[in-house]
Amino acid sequence: MSTEDKAKAAGKNIEGKAQEAMGNLTGDPEDQAKGKAKQGEAEARQTVENAKDKVKKAID
């Protein structure tokens, strides 16, 4: 996983956690859902990048 991709995924995860927390504080279910979705997107990005790393290691 490249450093840039790791940073993007981590940033998206943090952004999602913050948005979900804000939704929890304000009672806004839309913010909660959007925050969880961003966290899911970050996890998917990490999974894809980990798979790329495994393939690259297998080739090398």
Image (tube, rainbow, N blue to C red):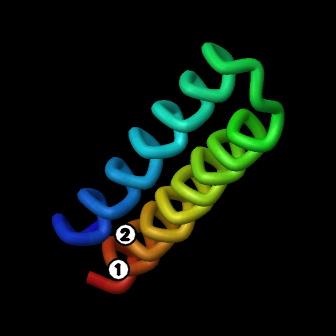
**SS category of the residue bearing label 1:** helix
Q: Residue at x 30, y 69 (%)?
A: 5
* Residue linked to disc 2: 53
Give the vertical position of 42 relative to 54 (above or below): above
* Residue with the most extreme front position: 26
Compare residues 15 and 25 and report the one nearer the observer. 25
Mark 1: few/some/many CA within 10 Å (<14, 14-19, 20+) = few
User: In the drawing, does residue 8 fall left or right of residue 38?
Assistant: left
The amino acid sitting under disc 2 is: Asp
Furthest-top residue in view?
Answer: 25
Question: How far is mark 1 from mark 2, CA to CA?
Answer: 5 Å
Residue 50 falls left or right of residue 57: right
Foreground: 60 or 14?
14
Name the kind of residue labelled 1 in the image.
Answer: Lys
Q: Is residue 28 above or below residue 38?
A: above
Relative vertical location of residue 57 with respect to residue 46 in this rendering, above or below: below
Seen at 72% across and 34% down, the residue is: 32
**7 or 2: nearer the viewer:** 7
Q: Residue furthest left?
A: 3
**Label 2 crowding class (10 Å Cα cut-off): few <14, some 14-19, many 20+?**
some
Q: Which mark is residue 33?
A: none
For the residues bearing labels 1 and 2, Cβ distance under 8 angstroms? yes
Residue named by callout 1: 56
Residue 34 in percent (x, y) is at 70, 49
Give left or right: position of 15 versus 5: right
Question: Where residue 13 sits: x, y (%)?
Answer: 46, 44
Q: Position of residue 26 (x, y in %)?
A: 66, 20
Q: How many marks?
A: 2
Q: Secondary structure at mark 2?
A: helix
Quarter of the figure with the C terminus: bottom left
